[in-house]
Image (cartoon, helix red, strand yellow):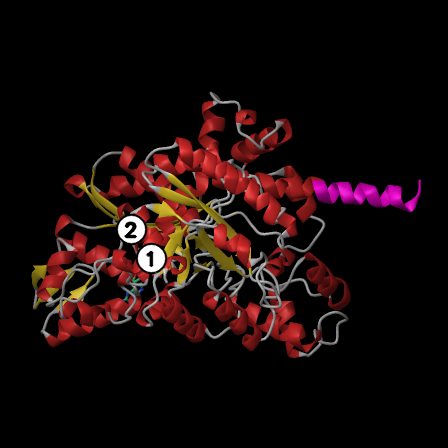
Amino acid sequence: MQNPDIARLFDEVADLLEIHRNAARTIRDFPEPIADLVRAGTKDLTDIPGIGDDLAEKITDIVTTGELPLRKQLASKLPAGLLDLLRIPGLGPKRVKLLYKKLKVKSAADLAKALEAGRIQKLKGFGPKMEEKIRAGLGQVHVGERRLLLNEAETQATAVLAYLRAGGGIRQIEVAGSYRRRRETIGDLDIVVTPEEQDSANAMDRFVKYGDVAEVISKGETRATVKLRGGLQVDLRAVEPDAYGAALLYFTGSKAHNIELRKIAQEKSYKLNEYGLFKGTRRAAGKTEEEIYGKLGLDWIAPELREARGEITLAREHRLPKLVELDDIRGDLQMHTSATDGKGTIEDMAHAARALGYQYIAITDHSKRVTMALGLDAKRLRAQWKAIDAWNATSRGFTILKSIELDILESGKLDLPDDVLAEADYVVATIHYGIDQSEQELTRRLVGAAEHPWVDTIGHPTGRLVGKREPYHFDFEALCRACAATGCLLELNGHPERMDLPDTLAAAGKQHGVRFVLSTDSHQPGNLPFMKYAVYLARRAGLEAGDILNTRPLAEFRKGLKRAKP
Ligand code: DGT
Ligand code: CA
Ligand code: CA
Ligand code: ZN
């Protein structure tokens, strides 16, 4: 046996494991709880595209035993802390392995010690810049405390709520906390319930028997806390109907918002807590949030705005924005097809978008620089546009916009020539490469693209990946000024892994007079409902329908694009 033969076996193991990465995606994107299908036994899992016999068997194992033997076997060969290290931005499998082999770094704590002692930068292939990055990464990632993405939390919350409701005896129930504020990550779920007839003990009993509970942390008459199998903590608190609004308000937070409210209450010689708004011992309000805000002289504030960023002043002056809603959205402006790294045809995407009630979509496959995704060159792009023309010619009341997710190259040049871009209906320009360039270079690339006559929108403008990669360093104000001056739009990418622009930057963009589009960055038809996350993001930024161009009917949308301007 020759070296290449031995090597090939390792390559194959790596490839076979990579298949599990695809399986993870398929399962994550699957619209129904797969565990229910396994338990019901009515559906053959291998009917699901991307799931074969082997994966079906593994999924069944996981659902029935809670563990995957293959994972256990692989994990048993390495210290448990290594998986935590992989979550630190800047550290991939290669670097983690080096740290382990050379410095015996087995955990985040070991890594911090090695940084302290200056041993990291002496390691071959690391250097001071890398050390800096790892230090920053260690600071952001609270190792051991994994925050869920909003869509993951939503899956868990929906299932728990359905379970509790099915038990009956519930008058009102809602998930409060960061989940209700629609933050992009969720630490734990805080559920507030009003049982019928003061029957809170029953609700607690049922709660701790929920099938996915791994551990009951505490259980009393009116509150209980459990940890689910995946590690998510869920708190349930039962309150009487007269305190429901007060409890919901308190547990929705944010803490900073609550503190401001309590101060206002004190100024009006009230006391505000989770049981109500009190004057002495008399409860002046508590049943609903509206009446509590009202007694404090405030309009009701949407949970997405409760971050103590000026919303209370606006509520007092009756100047709160009329936040955009999902129903306002008439089209989706970023999605991929099987021509590049997506999993549906143009027709599949259009069909699914139409079912959501949209009037238009843009098909934005990658341009050629993104070789990993088989990005389109001018020839393939024009062929795709021809197919789109043909499709549009036969469809009524729905339009596919000819578009492209155009790479802004490392040099600042665009990935396709102007004559091609001029033929598009809509162009969204994005950065995927050279993200470690200097602040000046990145700013120049983004501003240059925003000023280009055929670029309508800057897509996922900061490049952040939630919990994995911080926004890259560039002058966001400069980009906003360029967008405001040229009419270039900024995208709010609602893909739960991106959520880009972040809410605070979107709010800052609005102050600069920038307008936005909302998109999902869908990679298959089943991703199109991600639009709600883009809407949540926009709402957290205080955006109204008028700030967002794809709330407009198609003709107005087209007129609002930079390319339509004289
Ligand atoms: P998370 O779970 O980390 O994503 O964020 P939250 O906002 O859900 O925070 P959590 O679960 O610790 O608490 C839920 C809400 O309860 C929080 O948003 C406000 C309220 N709360 C918790 N602790 C305090 C506190 O010490 N003071 C006040 N005023 N409110 C609190
Ligand atoms: Ca929480
Ligand atoms: Ca909590
Ligand atoms: Zn992209």
Which amino acid type is shown beneath numbered disc 2?
A: Arg
Q: Is residue 194 above or below residue 477?
A: above
Which residue lies at the image location 66% right of the left edge and 43% below the top edge? 18
For this orientation, the residue located farthest to the right is 1
Q: Looking at the image, is mark 1 or mark 2 earlier in the sequence?
A: 2
Give the x, y percent position of residue 497: 48, 53
- Quadrant position of residue 541: bottom left
**Helix, strand or loop for disc 2:** loop
Q: Which residues are magenta?
A: 1-15
Residue that carries the numbered disc 1 in the rendered image: 560
| Residue 117 image offset from top left, x and y in percent | 68, 79
Q: Residue at x 71, y 75 (%)?
A: 127
Looking at the rendered structure, the secondary structure element under dot 1 is helix
State yes or no: residue 72 in magenta: no
Quadrant where the C terminus sits is bottom left
Quote the CA–CA distance across marks 1 and 2.
9 Å
**In the shown orientation, is residue 92 left or right of residue 169?**
right
Q: Amino acid at mark 1?
A: Gly
- Is label 2's Cβ within 8 Å of ligand 4? no
Tell me which residue sits at (47%, 38%) in the image: 388
Q: Nearer the viewer, residue 85 or 455?
A: 455
**Where is mark 2, residue-wise?**
552
